[in-house]
Amino acid sequence: MLVAVYYSNRDVRLEERPVPTIGPGEVLVRVRACGICGTDVLEWYRRPRAPVVLGHEIAGEVVEVGDGVVHLRPGDRVVVAHHVPCGACDDCYAGHETVCPVLQEGHVDPGGFAEYIRVPALQARRGIFRLPDSLTWADGAMVEPLGCVLRGQRLARLAPGQSVVVIGCGVAGLLHIRAARALGAGPIFGVEPDPFRREVTLRVGAFAVWSPEDDVVGALQAHLEGRRAERVVVCTSAPAAVELAFRCVERGGTVLFFAPLPPTATVPLPFNDLFWRNEVTLTSSYGAAPADMRRALNLLRWGRIAVRDLITHRFALRDIAQAFELVLRPRGSLKVLVEP
């Protein structure tokens, strides 16, 4: 089978490997669509693990099931979670499934940027979800990113009627806007440097959007009668966005960090302004648990959140180097899919 092996952002090589052999409880899936995540091009994060086959936003077709698998059969259309929690440790019992060591260590073999993947037994039991006929392969590839968004908003305790600022309106930020609207939050505002993405931000439901070069806080307060946002979501790895988030959040509000910063980045923390008397909460989110994936799939199935218009480019696996280049240098692009 053909696989794409990541060595660096501009060195993604096509290689031939044997189709994985499955064992008891495992499942072989033919990958039909896999999205490129922003974390796939974080070199500081990916290169230490290279060479590696990336790809964790996976939709595909069941080809073979191992002994003991009774809930799936060949031909089933599915969404596959790249990794799943054990469900039995202290972290899982506390509701922190995505920090479970089993989740962070396990993954499909070899990765979604391949023609076939082997899904280990634990993932086959807890991390494969049927894709309804009403949804496309591309829809299925959006389940994981939407699941991550839903988990982040739940941890931030987003509620109907709350004002929201989303800083960084790439795919994750746009999904946050749509998910917040579906929940009934609002008004929702965006901050985004790219003009194309600012236009899309308004189209997906933001009340207003500004460049980070604008007087964002002043404009926000003009809309909110002098107040700031009850929830601020940071969806970019720019340290300046974190500082802006601190200025945009209202007393008693919450800042959700949804994107990592470079490992050497430092950000000043105005401790007294945020915490002493103002009771601001800072929280973060990583990944999606099985329940988040299922919620995302249901929201797509019943048309509560739209994602198809966020998919702007599709590439064959053989052209994955071009796909990575587009993600690195976006030119009118949002979600980029690879279709092996």
Image (cartoon, rainbow, N blue to C red):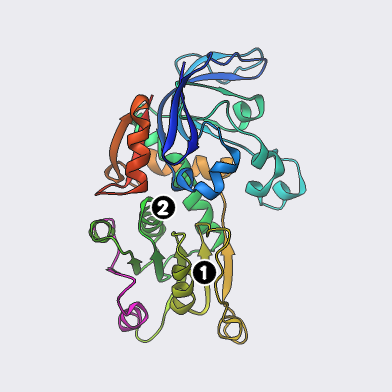
Q: Position of residue 223 (x, y in %)?
A: 31, 79
The secondary element bearing badge 1 is classed as strand
Which three-letter amino acid code belongs to the residue tagged 1? Val
Q: Position of residue 275 (x, y in %)?
A: 61, 81
Q: Does residue 249 appear to the left or right of 187 in the view shown?
A: right
Q: Is residue 338 magenta?
A: no
Q: Please give the name of the residue rendered at 62% of the width and 28% of the height, measured from the top-left corner.
A: 125
Q: Please give the name of the residue rendered at 63% of the width and 47% of the height, measured from the top-left corner.
A: 98
Q: Quadrant of the C terminus?
A: top left
Instruction: For label 2, count other residues whose C-alpha is less than 10 Å away and answer few (under 14), some (14-19) or many (20+).
Output: many
Q: Position of residue 261 (x, y in %)?
A: 52, 60
Which three-letter amino acid code belongs to the residue tagged 2? Ala
Q: Is residue 85 in sight in this rendering?
A: no
Residue in front for this viewpoint, 110 or 163: 110
Q: Does residue 175 appear to the left or right of 51 in the view shown?
A: left
The secondary element bearing badge 2 is classed as helix
Residue in front for this viewpoint, 131 or 219: 219
The image quarter in which residue 221 lies: bottom left
Q: Which residues are magenta?
A: 203-224
173 is higher (above) or lower (below) than 301: below
Q: Is residue 59 in sight in this rendering?
A: yes
Q: Which mark is residue 172?
A: 2
Residue carrying label 1:
255
112 is higher (above) or lower (below) than 143: above
Sequence-wise, the earlier of marks 2 and 1 is 2
